[in-house]
Amino acid sequence: MLQFFKSSLLTRLIVLLLLLLALRLPLLWWGIPLMPVELRSLLIGERLHDGARLYQDVYDSTAPLAAALAGLAELAGNRLLWLHRLLALALFTFQALRFNFVLNRADVHPERGYVGALVYLLLGSITPDLDILSPLLLGHSFLIAAFSALLPTSREGYDNRRLFRAGFLIGVAALCYLPLALFLLLGLFAVIIFAASSFRSFLLLLCGFFFPYAVVTTFFLYTNSLPGFSQFHLQPTFSGLVAGADGLPLWVQLRLLVLPGLLLLLGLGRSFAIPPGLVFQVKFQQLMLVWLVVAVAMGAAGGGRAPGTLVLILPPLTYFSLYLWQKNRRAWVPELLLLLVVGAVLVLRYRSALFLDAVIPVPLESRYAVQPNPRYAFLQGQQILVLGPDMRPYAQNRLATPYLDWQLAQTDLGRLNEYDAVFRVARNFQLAPPRYLIDQRGLVPELQYKIPAVFSRYEPTNTPGVYRLKR
């Protein structure tokens, strides 16, 4: 198997893509569970498609480009979850093939081929987190594209266009998922070891990074959404208020990382045991170590729960694992190891179909999908507002008013003793009054007392905590 993919022929690429589809497509027969991050994305896209303005008519911390993509996806149809999954698969495949192309072009290993892409796609399929079109997966695609622009400076000299492009793409990645801005540290290290004039080169990298932010800031300035961009995106992300709120629990993530972590440790040990190669290859190895450190720092900063966290370590994991697949005196050892990896990935992904979920101590990810609350089963296709953190009722209904993220909604609903907050609540409800209110925090009596012109129109239903707008 290894010898087959240690070739650059087009047939190897076709077989690789067929293997990926064979691994992913059968899972569709068991349905596509709706994960919390996908529900959030669908709701944002729905609101933007209806003409709402991000950070002004939608209180959420999602980065602007990720939200814009969700809005564009709504143009194809309402809440097309399969389209989001298809886009995620396309981006994930692009990352694997692009990174494999960089490895081959840079000659970081004596053997070329599609082994790097094979490992990337295999280990990335170990969890359904990378089946999801998360902001992190979207931003990481731009990061992979930026990485190739950092390398040629060692051979072609100081190249303004390449450094600016690298900074620009890292900035675009941060506009998809803000913590990816930490990878400027990777760019700084690349500039130090590759560029002739490190300080001026890094300034050029920073200029490229801030250029997309200047464009986005100008857009929000002219749409009167700049204060909301700072209040609902920049500040919450920097403070860690909403980072990783929609992902799998940390202990589940750690169990899924056992196999990739073991391969990473084996690859690291093997790379340090082999005599160093050319100067460029040594520098590339150092660059991958820095990537690994930044990825671990990002994962720790997000509590390890951000959807798609695994994708951060896939590039260094792919690179260091190549040392495991090199030729040695026992040619059967790498082949056997790769077969074991393939088998482990298949068992983990198909443990439910193989009736192994009770044996393998990793809970099914579908347990953390959005499950409809039977208490609100009578609500179907209604304009609602949930006064609380439970977003499950939105799976079968539409969001009314800007209050999507409950933590960010505390800007208004948590300050009802302030006149400005009461005024904003009244204005938002007058513009788009929801048909039903689901009160999980007991706020309706206070709202009816302080804003009677709006909330006196709501009457309780037979379901406790649910209020209906009077006709």
Image (tube, helix red, strand yellow):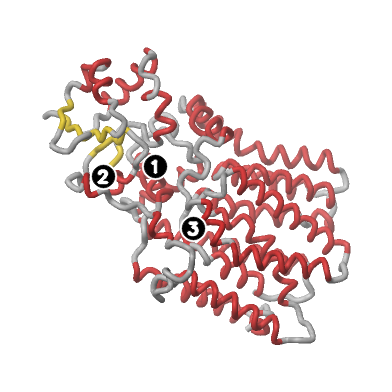
Q: Which mark is residue 397?
A: 2
Depth-wise, is mark 2 or mark 3 nearer the camera? Answer: 3
Secondary element type, mark 3: helix
Query: What x and y, as percent, mark residue 219?
Result: 51, 32
The residue positioned 66% from the left and 68% from the top of the image is 263
N-terminal label among 1 and 2? 1
* Label 3: how many Cα within 10 Å (few below 14, some 14–19, many 20+): many
Report whether 49 appears left or right of 95: left
Which of pointers 1 and 3 lies earlier in the amino acid sequence? 1
Q: Residue 208 carries which label?
A: none
Residue type pointed to by label 1: Ile
Amino acid type at circle 3 is Asp
Residue drawn at point x = 58 percent, y = 41 percent: 178
**Residue at label 1?**
44
The quadrant where residue 430 appears: top left
Residue 391, compared with residue 356, is above or below; it is: above
Calculate the distance from the C-alpha at mark 1 to the C-alpha at mark 3: 20 Å
Determine whether, in the image, residue 106 is placed left or right of residue 455: right
| Residue at the spot of label 3 | 129
- Residue 142 place in picture, x, y as percent: 60, 52
The Cα atoms of the two marked residues, 2 and 3, are separated by 25 Å
* Image quadrant in which the C terminus is located: top left
**Residue at 67% across, 66% down:** 318
- Local crowd size for mark 2, using a 10 Å CA cut-off: few (<14), some (14–19), many (≥20): some
Residue at x-position 67% and y-position 43%:
182
Q: Are marks 1 and 2 in contact (CB under 8 Å)?
A: no
- Determine the secondary structure under disc 1: helix
Q: Can residue 97 be seen in this view?
A: yes
Left or right, 68 with reference to 142: left
Q: Where is residue 409 in the image (x, y as percent from the top left)?
A: 40, 29
Q: Quadrant of residue 278?
A: bottom right
CA gap, disc 1 to disc 2?
Answer: 13 Å
